[in-house]
Image: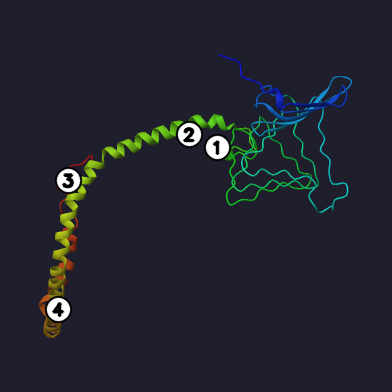
Amino acid sequence: MSERKKNWNERYLKSFGPRFRIDVCNPLMGGGGTDVCRMYGSTKKGDKFSFGMNESGTVEINADQRIDIIAGQNNDSRSTDIYIHSRSGTIDINVAQNGRVRIRGNGVDIDAADSITMNARSIRLEGADEISLQAPKVWSRGKKGNLVPKRWLQSVTAGSFIAADSLSGFLEKGLLEAAGQFDSINDLQAGFSSLAEQVGPLAQNLGTQLPGMAGQLSGLTGQLSTLAQTAAPQLQSIAGTVAPQLQSIATSPEVTQLGAALQEQAGAFANFGQGLVPTGY
């Protein structure tokens, strides 16, 4: 494979001393292609700085030490001093080692049209006055903590010396036994289905017969009412005839003399049957 041909004729290099220079169209290949232009600087200690653009269109700012961007000295306090805008794509802020990303201000607003995702080993929110969560739905899920939804046993045993885990076994056993009972009930489902099939036609036949039975009962009620109206005068007439006759018989001399004779002979019947009962019992 032949080496790429380098055009050194387009290069322009201007040095302003040993610690600063401007390099234009350097044909040496880099990560983004050859350089379009680049400025170099270095300190007495050897800390380097470069600012340039390569053929891929990427603009790079590289420094061995800190980079400060300061603006707004004479700007209006209600205006924007530093504006970073991405027309299309993503803005990445990456700390390679153990550094931190700090954003300080009197007010920090994070506004997203879709979603905000925070992923870390530990996330901590501190508010000197208030922390407010406002949304139509607020969810929390975890294993420990006072925001984790409590199970029923944890709510029952809250504030007591009874551990919720000690009751978990009983609850699990009860659920298993209940499951067995439900299985037995499911086994009876076929019998209930057969009974329902038999009861259905019976109820249907009974429904068709009840209107006729109601008519018959209504007719019988009418007959009983007519019979009662007819028999009432006849019974009153019989009572009026029989009552004087019975009174006459009860006050007749024959009945009166028979009663007196039985009263006189009452002592003769007092010991009747005593000799027929064995003694010693």
Q: Position of residue 87 (x, y in %)?
A: 64, 44
Whole-angstrom CA distance, mark 2 to mark 3, is 75 Å
Residue type at tag 4: Gly
Find residue 10 and name its label: none
| Nearer mark to the viewer, of 1 and 3 | 1
Q: Which residue is mark 1?
A: 153
Whole-angstrom CA distance, mark 1 to mark 4, is 68 Å
**Viewed as shown, does residue 213 lie left or right of 8?**
left
Confirm or deny contact between disc 2 and disc 1 (CB under 8 A). Answer: yes
**Earlier residue among tags 1 and 3:** 1
Count the numbered circles shown: 4
Whole-angstrom CA distance, mark 4 to mark 3, is 61 Å
Looking at the image, residue 124 lies above or below residue 241:
above
Find residue 277 and name its label: 3
Give the camera-side residue of 263 and 134.
134
Residue type at tag 3: Val
Q: Position of residue 200 (x, y in %)?
A: 18, 54
- Name the residue located 78 percent from the left edge and 49 percent from the top edge: 80
Give the camera-side residue of 246 and 207.
207
Packing grade of label 3 (10 A; few <14, some 14-19, many >=20) is: few
**Viewed as shown, does residue 245 lie left or right of 49?**
left
Packing grade of label 1 (10 A; few <14, some 14-19, many >=20) is: some
Confirm or deny contact between disc 2 and disc 4 (CB under 8 A). Answer: no
Residue type at tag 1: Leu
**Earlier residue among tags 4 and 3:** 4
Q: Which residue is mark 2?
A: 171
Secondary structure of residue under mark 4: helix
Q: Which residue is mark 4?
A: 222
- Name the residue located 67 percent from the left edge and 33 percent from the top edge: 58
Give the camera-side residue of 77 and 19.
19
